[in-house]
Amino acid sequence: MWRRVASLSPMISSSSSSSRSLALNQTASGLKLGESFATHMINPEERASPLKEKAPFITFVLGGPGSGKGTQCEKIVETFGLQHLSAGDLLRREIAMNTKNGATILNLIKDGKIVPSEVTVKLIQKELESSNSSKFLIDGFPRTEENRAAFERIIRADPDVVLFFDCPEEEMVTRVLNRNQGRIDDNITTMKKRLKIFNALNRPVIDYYKSKGKLYTINAVGTVDDIFQHVLPIFNSFEQFKESRHVNPKSTISSSLVETSS
Ligand SMILES: Nc1ncnc2c1ncn2[C@@H]1O[C@H](COP(=O)(O)OP(=O)(O)OP(=O)(O)O)[C@@H](O)[C@H]1O
Ligand SMILES: O=c1ccn([C@@H]2O[C@H](COP(=O)(O)O)[C@@H](O)[C@H]2O)c(=O)[nH]1
Ligand SMILES: [Mg+2]
Protein backbone atom coordinates (compact mmCIF):
# COMPACT_ATOMS: atom_id res chain seq x y z
CA MET A 1 0.00 0.00 0.00
CA TRP A 2 1.07 3.55 -0.67
CA ARG A 3 1.32 5.06 2.78
CA ARG A 4 0.03 8.60 3.13
CA VAL A 5 2.26 10.89 5.12
CA ALA A 6 -0.42 13.48 5.83
CA SER A 7 -4.03 14.17 5.09
CA LEU A 8 -3.70 17.31 2.96
CA SER A 9 -1.75 17.61 -0.23
CA PRO A 10 -0.46 21.06 -1.10
CA MET A 11 0.47 21.74 -4.69
CA ILE A 12 3.73 23.39 -5.60
CA SER A 13 2.86 27.05 -5.55
CA SER A 14 3.28 29.52 -8.36
CA SER A 15 5.41 29.50 -11.48
CA SER A 16 7.17 32.53 -10.11
CA SER A 17 8.45 30.51 -7.17
CA SER A 18 9.59 27.95 -9.70
CA SER A 19 11.57 30.57 -11.59
CA ARG A 20 12.98 31.82 -8.32
CA SER A 21 14.23 28.33 -7.48
CA LEU A 22 15.86 28.00 -10.86
CA ALA A 23 17.55 31.36 -10.45
CA LEU A 24 18.82 30.29 -7.05
CA ASN A 25 20.00 27.03 -8.49
CA GLN A 26 22.04 28.84 -11.07
CA THR A 27 23.97 30.54 -8.33
CA ALA A 28 24.42 27.43 -6.23
CA SER A 29 27.35 25.17 -6.93
CA GLY A 30 28.84 21.86 -5.90
CA LEU A 31 27.14 18.70 -4.71
CA LYS A 32 24.79 20.40 -2.24
CA LEU A 33 22.94 22.03 -5.10
CA GLY A 34 19.48 20.59 -4.40
CA GLU A 35 19.68 21.46 -0.74
CA SER A 36 19.33 25.13 -1.60
CA PHE A 37 15.60 24.48 -1.98
CA ALA A 38 14.90 22.65 1.23
CA THR A 39 13.29 25.73 2.75
CA HIS A 40 10.81 26.37 -0.08
CA MET A 41 7.60 27.78 1.45
CA ILE A 42 4.41 25.86 0.76
CA ASN A 43 1.25 27.95 0.74
CA PRO A 44 -1.14 26.36 3.28
CA GLU A 45 -4.05 27.41 1.08
CA GLU A 46 -2.84 25.18 -1.76
CA ARG A 47 -5.37 22.58 -2.76
CA ALA A 48 -5.34 18.90 -1.91
CA SER A 49 -4.00 16.63 -4.63
CA PRO A 50 -6.42 14.38 -6.52
CA LEU A 51 -3.84 11.66 -5.84
CA LYS A 52 -5.20 11.52 -2.31
CA GLU A 53 -8.19 9.64 -3.67
CA LYS A 54 -6.17 7.51 -6.11
CA ALA A 55 -3.59 6.01 -3.70
CA PRO A 56 -1.55 4.47 -6.53
CA PHE A 57 1.17 1.83 -6.18
CA ILE A 58 4.50 3.62 -6.64
CA THR A 59 7.88 2.09 -7.42
CA PHE A 60 11.00 4.24 -7.40
CA VAL A 61 13.70 2.91 -9.74
CA LEU A 62 17.22 3.92 -8.71
CA GLY A 63 20.75 3.15 -9.88
CA GLY A 64 23.75 4.93 -11.30
CA PRO A 65 23.86 6.45 -14.77
CA GLY A 66 23.74 3.66 -17.34
CA SER A 67 22.91 0.94 -14.80
CA GLY A 68 19.96 -0.14 -16.97
CA LYS A 69 16.99 1.49 -15.20
CA GLY A 70 15.19 2.51 -18.37
CA THR A 71 15.85 -0.84 -20.04
CA GLN A 72 14.45 -2.82 -17.11
CA CYS A 73 11.49 -0.43 -16.78
CA GLU A 74 10.48 -1.29 -20.34
CA LYS A 75 10.38 -4.96 -19.39
CA ILE A 76 8.44 -4.29 -16.20
CA VAL A 77 5.89 -2.28 -18.18
CA GLU A 78 5.55 -5.12 -20.73
CA THR A 79 4.99 -7.73 -18.07
CA PHE A 80 3.14 -5.95 -15.30
CA GLY A 81 1.55 -2.96 -17.03
CA LEU A 82 2.84 -0.20 -14.76
CA GLN A 83 3.09 3.30 -16.19
CA HIS A 84 6.70 4.38 -16.69
CA LEU A 85 7.64 7.92 -15.70
CA SER A 86 11.30 8.70 -16.32
CA ALA A 87 12.23 11.90 -14.50
CA GLY A 88 15.08 12.44 -16.97
CA ASP A 89 12.70 12.04 -19.93
CA LEU A 90 10.26 14.54 -18.41
CA LEU A 91 13.10 17.04 -18.04
CA ARG A 92 14.37 16.38 -21.57
CA ARG A 93 10.83 16.96 -22.84
CA GLU A 94 10.94 20.43 -21.23
CA ILE A 95 14.12 21.12 -23.17
CA ALA A 96 12.64 19.80 -26.43
CA MET A 97 9.50 21.89 -25.94
CA ASN A 98 11.58 24.95 -25.18
CA THR A 99 9.55 25.75 -22.05
CA LYS A 100 10.53 28.59 -19.76
CA ASN A 101 12.72 26.23 -17.71
CA GLY A 102 14.09 24.38 -20.74
CA ALA A 103 17.33 26.27 -21.19
CA THR A 104 18.21 26.09 -17.51
CA ILE A 105 17.44 22.37 -17.38
CA LEU A 106 19.65 21.82 -20.43
CA ASN A 107 22.58 23.53 -18.74
CA LEU A 108 22.14 21.50 -15.56
CA ILE A 109 21.87 18.17 -17.42
CA LYS A 110 24.89 19.05 -19.58
CA ASP A 111 26.83 19.47 -16.36
CA GLY A 112 25.37 16.35 -14.68
CA LYS A 113 23.75 18.51 -12.00
CA ILE A 114 20.42 18.02 -10.27
CA VAL A 115 17.45 20.10 -11.38
CA PRO A 116 15.63 21.80 -8.46
CA SER A 117 13.18 19.45 -6.76
CA GLU A 118 10.28 21.80 -7.20
CA VAL A 119 10.60 21.62 -10.98
CA THR A 120 10.99 17.83 -11.19
CA VAL A 121 8.30 17.02 -8.64
CA LYS A 122 5.86 19.32 -10.39
CA LEU A 123 6.44 17.48 -13.68
CA ILE A 124 5.96 14.10 -11.97
CA GLN A 125 2.87 15.36 -10.16
CA LYS A 126 1.28 16.46 -13.43
CA GLU A 127 1.81 13.00 -14.93
CA LEU A 128 0.50 11.21 -11.85
CA GLU A 129 -2.60 13.36 -11.66
CA SER A 130 -3.49 13.16 -15.32
CA SER A 131 -3.00 9.40 -15.61
CA ASN A 132 -5.68 6.73 -15.41
CA SER A 133 -3.13 4.24 -14.15
CA SER A 134 -2.96 3.12 -10.54
CA LYS A 135 0.61 1.80 -10.65
CA PHE A 136 3.73 3.74 -11.57
CA LEU A 137 7.44 3.25 -12.08
CA ILE A 138 9.22 6.49 -11.29
CA ASP A 139 12.61 6.08 -12.93
CA GLY A 140 15.66 8.09 -11.88
CA PHE A 141 13.98 9.88 -8.99
CA PRO A 142 14.53 10.83 -6.17
CA ARG A 143 18.14 11.81 -6.90
CA THR A 144 18.80 13.48 -3.54
CA GLU A 145 17.46 13.45 0.00
CA GLU A 146 16.04 16.89 -0.75
CA ASN A 147 14.22 15.42 -3.82
CA ARG A 148 12.80 12.73 -1.56
CA ALA A 149 11.61 15.23 1.03
CA ALA A 150 10.05 17.40 -1.69
CA PHE A 151 8.13 14.41 -3.10
CA GLU A 152 6.79 13.57 0.36
CA ARG A 153 5.90 17.18 1.04
CA ILE A 154 4.22 17.91 -2.28
CA ILE A 155 2.76 14.56 -3.34
CA ARG A 156 2.12 13.50 0.26
CA ALA A 157 3.07 9.89 -0.28
CA ASP A 158 5.80 7.28 0.03
CA PRO A 159 6.81 4.61 -2.50
CA ASP A 160 5.69 1.03 -1.96
CA VAL A 161 8.85 -0.42 -3.50
CA VAL A 162 12.31 0.92 -4.32
CA LEU A 163 14.47 -0.92 -6.84
CA PHE A 164 18.21 -0.31 -6.90
CA PHE A 165 20.12 -1.55 -9.96
CA ASP A 166 23.61 -2.07 -8.59
CA CYS A 167 26.24 -1.87 -11.33
CA PRO A 168 30.04 -1.36 -11.28
CA GLU A 169 31.22 2.04 -12.50
CA GLU A 170 33.31 0.69 -15.41
CA GLU A 171 30.26 -1.14 -16.77
CA MET A 172 28.08 1.98 -16.44
CA VAL A 173 30.68 4.05 -18.28
CA THR A 174 30.90 1.50 -21.10
CA ARG A 175 27.11 1.37 -21.46
CA VAL A 176 26.65 5.15 -21.45
CA LEU A 177 29.43 5.76 -23.96
CA ASN A 178 27.89 3.15 -26.28
CA ARG A 179 24.28 4.30 -25.89
CA ASN A 180 24.17 6.33 -29.12
CA GLN A 181 20.88 8.05 -28.43
CA GLY A 182 22.28 11.54 -28.91
CA ARG A 183 22.03 12.48 -25.23
CA ILE A 184 23.95 15.62 -24.34
CA ASP A 185 25.22 13.98 -21.12
CA ASP A 186 26.54 10.79 -22.73
CA ASN A 187 30.20 11.82 -22.80
CA ILE A 188 33.06 10.96 -20.49
CA THR A 189 33.33 14.42 -18.91
CA THR A 190 29.68 14.59 -17.88
CA MET A 191 29.64 10.91 -16.96
CA LYS A 192 32.43 11.44 -14.40
CA LYS A 193 30.39 14.25 -12.83
CA ARG A 194 27.22 12.15 -12.84
CA LEU A 195 28.98 9.30 -11.06
CA LYS A 196 30.32 11.68 -8.45
CA ILE A 197 26.86 13.13 -7.87
CA PHE A 198 25.33 9.66 -7.78
CA ASN A 199 27.73 8.56 -5.04
CA ALA A 200 27.43 11.74 -3.02
CA LEU A 201 23.70 12.46 -3.29
CA ASN A 202 21.80 9.39 -4.51
CA ARG A 203 23.44 6.77 -2.28
CA PRO A 204 22.04 8.37 0.90
CA VAL A 205 18.54 8.03 -0.62
CA ILE A 206 19.20 4.35 -1.32
CA ASP A 207 20.44 3.90 2.26
CA TYR A 208 17.33 5.63 3.56
CA TYR A 209 14.98 3.21 1.79
CA LYS A 210 17.11 0.29 2.94
CA SER A 211 16.61 1.44 6.51
CA LYS A 212 12.85 1.54 5.85
CA GLY A 213 12.85 -2.05 4.53
CA LYS A 214 11.64 -0.97 1.09
CA LEU A 215 14.81 -1.48 -0.92
CA TYR A 216 15.36 -4.33 -3.38
CA THR A 217 18.97 -4.40 -4.60
CA ILE A 218 19.40 -6.07 -7.96
CA ASN A 219 22.75 -7.10 -9.42
CA ALA A 220 22.68 -5.18 -12.71
CA VAL A 221 25.48 -7.12 -14.39
CA GLY A 222 24.53 -9.70 -17.00
CA THR A 223 22.16 -9.80 -19.92
CA VAL A 224 18.98 -7.74 -19.88
CA ASP A 225 16.93 -10.94 -19.56
CA ASP A 226 19.08 -12.35 -16.76
CA ILE A 227 18.66 -9.16 -14.77
CA PHE A 228 14.94 -9.14 -15.37
CA GLN A 229 14.74 -12.62 -13.86
CA HIS A 230 15.74 -10.97 -10.56
CA VAL A 231 13.08 -8.30 -10.97
CA LEU A 232 10.18 -10.66 -11.71
CA PRO A 233 9.81 -12.20 -8.23
CA ILE A 234 9.69 -8.75 -6.63
CA PHE A 235 6.51 -7.78 -8.47
CA ASN A 236 5.13 -11.31 -8.33
CA SER A 237 5.28 -11.05 -4.55
CA PHE A 238 2.66 -8.30 -4.58
CA GLU A 239 -0.89 -9.60 -4.75
CA GLN A 240 -2.16 -6.83 -7.04
CA PHE A 241 0.35 -7.79 -9.74
CA LYS A 242 -0.63 -11.45 -9.61
CA GLU A 243 -4.20 -10.46 -10.28
CA SER A 244 -3.71 -7.72 -12.83
CA ARG A 245 -0.65 -9.00 -14.69
CA HIS A 246 -0.51 -7.37 -18.08
CA VAL A 247 -0.22 -9.97 -20.83
CA ASN A 248 1.80 -8.89 -23.82
CA PRO A 249 1.43 -11.45 -26.60
CA LYS A 250 4.96 -10.64 -27.82
CA SER A 251 6.47 -11.51 -24.47
CA THR A 252 7.11 -15.19 -23.83
CA ILE A 253 8.12 -14.44 -20.26
CA SER A 254 4.82 -12.79 -19.37
CA SER A 255 2.78 -15.40 -21.24
CA SER A 256 4.44 -18.32 -19.52
CA LEU A 257 4.14 -16.62 -16.13
CA VAL A 258 0.43 -16.12 -16.55
CA GLU A 259 0.04 -19.79 -17.43
CA THR A 260 1.95 -21.05 -14.42
CA SER A 261 0.33 -18.72 -11.91
CA SER A 262 -3.32 -19.36 -12.78
N1 LIG B 1 22.25 -5.64 -19.04
C1 LIG B 1 22.76 -4.88 -19.97
N2 LIG B 1 23.87 -5.24 -20.62
C2 LIG B 1 24.42 -4.45 -21.58
N3 LIG B 1 23.92 -3.27 -21.96
C3 LIG B 1 22.81 -2.85 -21.33
C4 LIG B 1 22.17 -3.61 -20.31
N4 LIG B 1 21.09 -2.93 -19.87
C5 LIG B 1 21.05 -1.80 -20.56
N5 LIG B 1 22.05 -1.74 -21.44
C6 LIG B 1 22.37 -0.65 -22.38
O1 LIG B 1 23.09 0.32 -21.62
C7 LIG B 1 22.67 1.64 -21.97
C8 LIG B 1 22.11 2.34 -20.73
O2 LIG B 1 20.93 1.67 -20.32
P1 LIG B 1 19.69 2.49 -19.78
O3 LIG B 1 19.43 3.63 -20.68
O4 LIG B 1 18.61 1.53 -19.52
O5 LIG B 1 20.32 2.98 -18.39
P2 LIG B 1 19.76 4.03 -17.35
O6 LIG B 1 20.07 3.49 -16.00
O7 LIG B 1 18.36 4.37 -17.66
O8 LIG B 1 20.73 5.25 -17.63
P3 LIG B 1 20.50 6.81 -17.37
O9 LIG B 1 20.48 7.01 -15.89
O10 LIG B 1 21.70 7.45 -17.98
O11 LIG B 1 19.21 7.19 -18.03
C9 LIG B 1 21.65 1.48 -23.09
O12 LIG B 1 22.30 1.63 -24.33
C10 LIG B 1 21.15 0.04 -22.92
O13 LIG B 1 20.73 -0.53 -24.14
O1 LIG C 1 15.11 13.58 -10.87
C1 LIG C 1 15.96 13.92 -11.71
C2 LIG C 1 16.24 13.16 -12.85
C3 LIG C 1 17.19 13.59 -13.73
N1 LIG C 1 17.83 14.77 -13.52
C4 LIG C 1 18.82 15.28 -14.50
O2 LIG C 1 18.68 14.61 -15.74
C5 LIG C 1 19.88 13.91 -16.04
C6 LIG C 1 19.56 12.64 -16.76
O3 LIG C 1 18.71 11.83 -15.98
P1 LIG C 1 18.49 10.28 -16.32
O4 LIG C 1 17.64 9.73 -15.23
O5 LIG C 1 19.83 9.66 -16.31
O6 LIG C 1 17.84 10.21 -17.64
C7 LIG C 1 20.59 13.76 -14.69
O7 LIG C 1 21.98 13.59 -14.80
C8 LIG C 1 20.24 15.08 -14.05
O8 LIG C 1 21.03 16.12 -14.60
C9 LIG C 1 17.54 15.53 -12.41
O9 LIG C 1 18.13 16.60 -12.20
N2 LIG C 1 16.61 15.08 -11.54
MG1 LIG D 1 17.41 6.21 -18.12
Image (cartoon, rainbow, N blue to C red):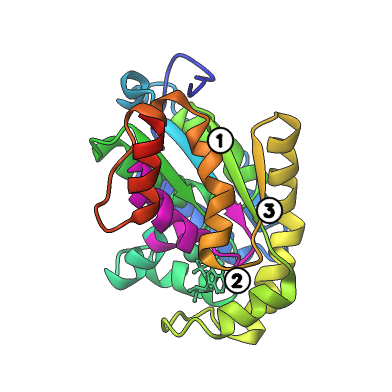
Mark 1 Cα within 10 Å, few/some/many (few <14, many 20+)? many
C-alpha distance separating marks 2 and 3: 13 Å
Q: Which residue is mark 2?
A: 112
Q: Is residue 144 something one can see in this rendering?
A: yes
Q: Report which quarter residue 247 is drawn in.
A: top left
Q: Is disc 1 in contact with disc 3, using a CB cutoff of under 8 Å?
A: no
Tell me if residue 41 can be seen.
Answer: no
Q: Which residue position holds label 1?
A: 161
Is the CB of the residue bearing disc 2 within 8 angstroms of ligand 2? yes
C-alpha separation, residue under disc 1 versus residue under disc 3: 16 Å
The correct choice, above or below, for 212 with respect to 190 in the image is above
Q: Which tag is nearer the camera, tag 2 or tag 1?
A: 1
Residue 179 or residue 184, whichever sits in front: 179
User: Residue at 75% across / 60% down in the picture?
Assistant: 199
Quote the CA–CA distance across marks 2 and 1: 26 Å
Dot placed on the residue nearer the N-terminal end, 1 or 3:
1
**Quadrant (top left/top right/bottom left/bottom right) for the C terminus:** top left
Mark 2 vs 3, N-terminal side: 2
| Residue type marked 3 | Asn
Q: How many marks?
A: 3
Indicate if the residue with disc 3 has its beta carbon within 8 Å of ligand 2: no
In front: label 2 or label 3: 3
Q: x, y percentage for residue 43? A: 44, 28
Q: Which residue is mark 3?
A: 202
Indicate the position of residue 145 as horizontal and vertical percent values: 67, 44
Q: Secondary structure at mark 3?
A: helix
- Residue at horizontal 68%, vertical 53%? 202
Task: Give 63 or 256, whichever is nearer the viewer.
Answer: 256
Q: Quadrant of residue 205?
A: top right
- The reply, left or right, for residue 97 in relation to residue 143 is left
Q: Are marks 2 and 1 in contact (CB under 8 Å)?
A: no
- Compare residues 229 and 39 and report the one nearer the observer: 229
